[in-house]
Image (cartoon, rainbow, N blue to C red):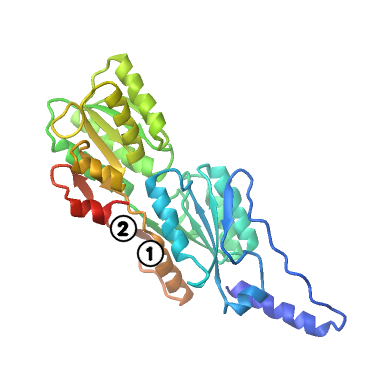
């Protein structure tokens, strides 16, 4: 915000000193980015002075997220952010979406050039962010990570509001150990490779498989997609390999896996042939647990906007943050114990 106030004062002084100057027309910068998609709120980024002055001074924010259609989690996450970062709440917000790191980086560079006060980032990949975050710091744009961590020096961002993805995986693995199966033959459906969710949830299963002697029948990325997951599980069924556990790193992939099981007349759920495990706690997925068609679902909290606005408020007030990484509390659910109240309260 300080950059904009100084710019406005200098502009006013210059206009007073020039007797022949007329009023210039406002220039609106394009919100588009190559490859990805970008949306702006009702107050366009790049519109200095008049609109901002009349509104009392908005905090400009560039928000980079993954595709809202990627999953139920991402849809809920995007909706939560859009409800919080509004003009009525004191923000001039633009949103950019992509599942590709290079497109997200291009959007970040655009926001930094626009001079946003804050860059909020849910990175598609953990790597490749050092240079653009250094540019942000040099330009006075503060960076806050949400949903996903990145491999960058902590000095390059103010805070990271995230789920502990490996802890989510460890909770799931501990639950699976507790099933005390005679043997563990697991189809592992991974999310987008390189994302922190994939890395954390995969690492937990990989470590358990090695220490416990579990067999990973198939380990492939379905990129969070139900159809891809169905194809992978169908190929395992066609191969004749035995399996009794589906460990899917999100609910949509678990749903795809179940579609393949149903097609092959393989029973699944409580006391059935195949254990089904998912993550994210979509309401429809928790209903599958309640019906005992699935066995386990791990929560990944999509409601991060309140954490983000709290951090921004503290920074705007000149406060020092007490912690760099803010982990949200998350639950897990077992088909044997889940209730309708759980479905209604935690389903997204």
Residue 321 - label: none
Q: Earlier in the sequence, mark 1 or mark 2?
A: 1
Question: Can the viewer see residue 182?
Answer: yes
Q: What residue lies at 79% left-to-right and 76% top-to-bottom? A: 23
Q: Check if mark 1's residue and mark 2's residue have beta carbons within 8 Å.
A: yes
Cα gap from disc 1 to disc 2, whole angstroms: 9 Å
Q: Which residue is mark 2?
A: 328
Element class at badge 1: helix
Q: Residue at x 27, y 57 (%)?
A: 329
> Foreground: 85 or 114?
85
Whether residue 330 is visible, yes or no, is: no
Query: Is 43 displayed left or right of 148 in the figure?
Result: right
Q: Is 25 on the left-hand or right-hand side of 175?
A: right
Q: Position of residue 11 (x, y in %)?
A: 73, 77
List the residue tagged with mark 1.
307
Q: Secondary structure at mark 2?
A: loop
């Amino acid at each position: 915000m300080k950059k904009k106030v100084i710019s406005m004062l200098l502009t006013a002084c210059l206009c007073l000193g020039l007797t022949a100057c007329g009023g210039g027309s406002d220039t609106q910068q394009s919100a588009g980015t190559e490859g990805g998609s970008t949306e702006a709120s009702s107050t366009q980024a790049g519109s200095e002075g008049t609109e901002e002055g009349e509104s009392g001074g908005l905090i400009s924010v560039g928000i980079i997220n993954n595709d809202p259609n990627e999953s139920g989690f991402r849809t809920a996450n995007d909706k939560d952010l859009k409800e919080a970062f509004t003009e009525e709440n004191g923000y001039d917000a633009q949103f950019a979406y992509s599942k590709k790191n290079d497109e997200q980086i291009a959007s970040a560079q655009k926001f930094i050039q626009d001079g946003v006060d804050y860059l909020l980032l849910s990175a598609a990949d953990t790597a490749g962010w050092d240079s653009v975050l250094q540019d942000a710091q040099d330009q006075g744009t503060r960076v806050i990570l949400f949903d996903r961590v990145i491999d960058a020096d902590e000095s390059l961002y103010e805070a990271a509001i995230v789920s502990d993805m490996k802890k989510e995986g460890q909770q799931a693995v501990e639950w699976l150990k507790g099933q005390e199966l005679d043997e563990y033959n697991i189809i592992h459906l991974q999310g987008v490779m390189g994302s922190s969710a994939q890395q954390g949830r995969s690492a937990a299963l990989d470590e358990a498989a090695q220490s416990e002697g579990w067999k990973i029948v198939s380990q492939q990325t379905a990129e969070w997609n139900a159809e891809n997951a169905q194809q992978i599980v169908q190929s395992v069924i066609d191969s004749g390999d035995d399996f009794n556990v589906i460990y899917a790193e999100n609910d949509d992939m678990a749903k795809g896996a179940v579609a393949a099981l149903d097609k092959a007349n393989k029973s699944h759920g409580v006391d059935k042939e195949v254990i089904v495990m998912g993550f994210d706690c979509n309401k429809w997925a928790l209903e599958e647990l309640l019906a005992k068609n699935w066995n386990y679902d791990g929560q990944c909290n999509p409601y991060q906007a309140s954490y983000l606005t709290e951090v921004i408020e503290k920074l705007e007030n000149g406060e020092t943050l007490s912690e760099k990484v803010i982990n949200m509390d998350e639950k897990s659910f077992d088909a044997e114990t889940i209730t309708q109240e759980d479905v209604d309260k935690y389903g997204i």
